[in-house]
Image (tube, rainbow, N blue to C red):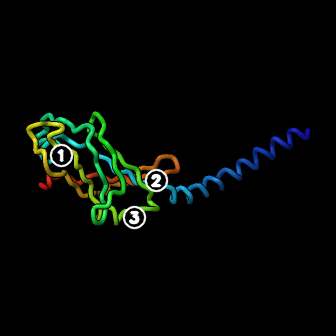
Amino acid sequence: MALKYLIFFSILFAAIAFPVAEAQLGIIGNLLGLLRIQGILYCTPNGNIGVNGTATPVFPNALVQLQCGDGNVVSSATTNASGLFSMLLDPLSFLLSTLLSNCKLVVGTPLATCNASLPSIGTLESTLQFIGNTLLGILNIGNIIPTGFRLIPV
């Protein structure tokens, strides 16, 4: 009989405690988060997809840097075989408003690396745009993309 009471009170306690824990994690979950900057870099004179949906080659193995202020590199990533890059940032170290107004993506890898007919000097640069949040479990991820790369001659 004592075992039945033990089981009953254990289930009752769990039923009461779990919603409280979930509510507390909800508050903590709002504090937990990441900022994700990602995009695809294309092997074109401006690093963007071609016009009219034409087949556009990607730019693999290119170094993409996040530069803030006076060109301070705060993060970097290398594009994969599909031209995709992704950077994760701690939102406690970076304010979203500062990233959007004071930072840019810079590709210093020469365009001639992916296509010899493209310029071998200059950098590709893009400002940033916030496109919304993604909730992954209790983790809130702020999604940021490049607004569009442009060639900056050296």
Q: Residue 39: give x, y in percent of width and height.
A: 28, 46
Q: Quadrant of the N terminus?
A: top right
Residue designated by label 3: 95
1 or 2: mark nearer the eye: 1
Residue designated by label 1: 47
Distance from disc 3 to disc 1, alpha carbons, whole Å, reads 27 Å
Within 10 Å of the Cα at label 1, are there few (<14), some (14-19), or many (20+) other Cα atoms?
A: many
SS for callout 2? strand
Residue designated by label 2: 140
Which sits in the foreground, 121 or 84? 121
The answer to whether mark 1 and mark 2 are in CB contact below 8 A is no
The answer to whether mark 3 and mark 1 are in CB contact below 8 A is no
| Relative horizontal placement of residue 30, taking residue 110 as reference (left or right) | right
Mark 3 or mark 2: name the one nearer the start of the chain: 3
Q: Is residue 109 above or below residue 92?
A: above
Mark 1 or mark 2: name the one nearer the start of the chain: 1
Q: Residue 115: give x, y in percent of width and height.
A: 13, 36
Residue type marked 1? Gly
Residue type marked 3? Leu
